[in-house]
Image (cartoon, helix red, strand yellow):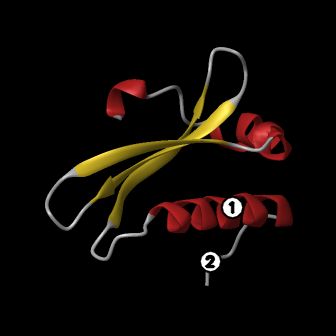
Amino acid sequence: MIDYMNDEEATFFNWCDETVRAHISQEGTKLSRWRPRKNNDGSYELIFELMHSEGTTSRQLVPVPKQFHELLEREYFINHPDHEDDF
């Protein structure tokens, strides 16, 4: 079990887990990498890459609910500058 700093953080990461699980429908599909991304309009999306059993990959973009935007501003983007080139 993972220890989170607070309930808000735990809720966000649980939402991320559920979102990724909902997109892994094929047997043998695995999460390759993920991160939140801030859009130019101030909204956020969860961007993640899936590896499929046949060797292909796919990228998924899911809007992050507004309830987590402040958390991402406060906790994530302070220490993680935009790293679009990494993904």
**Residue 69 point in image, percent of width and height:** 78, 38
Q: Taking 74 as reference, is 33 above or below it?
A: below
Q: Classify residue 18 as left or right of residue 51.
A: right
**Residue 6 point in image, percent of width and height:** 82, 64
Quadrant position of residue 67: top right
Residue 2: numbered disc: 2
Q: Classify residue 43 as left or right of residue 46.
A: right
Q: Nearer the viewer, residue 63 or 6?
A: 63
Q: Residues within 10 Å of mark 1 (few under 14, many from 20)?
A: some
What residue type is disc 1 on? Trp
Residue at image coords 70%, 16%: 41
Q: Taking 40 as reference, is 27 above or below it?
A: below
**Residue 45 point in image, percent of width and height:** 61, 37
Q: Quadrant of the C terminus?
A: top left
Q: Secondary structure at mark 2?
A: loop
> Disc 1 designates what residue?
15
Q: Give the foreground label among 1 and 2.
A: 1
Residue at image coords 72%, 57%: 12
Residue at image coords 62%, 67%: 18
What is the CA distance from the residue labelled 1 to the residue labelled 2? 14 Å
What residue type is disc 2 on? Ile
Residue 65: numbered disc: none
Residue at image coords 83%, 59%: 8
Residue 12 shows up from this direction: yes
Q: Nearer the viewer, residue 79 or 82?
A: 82
Q: Classify residue 83 as left or right of residue 78.
A: left
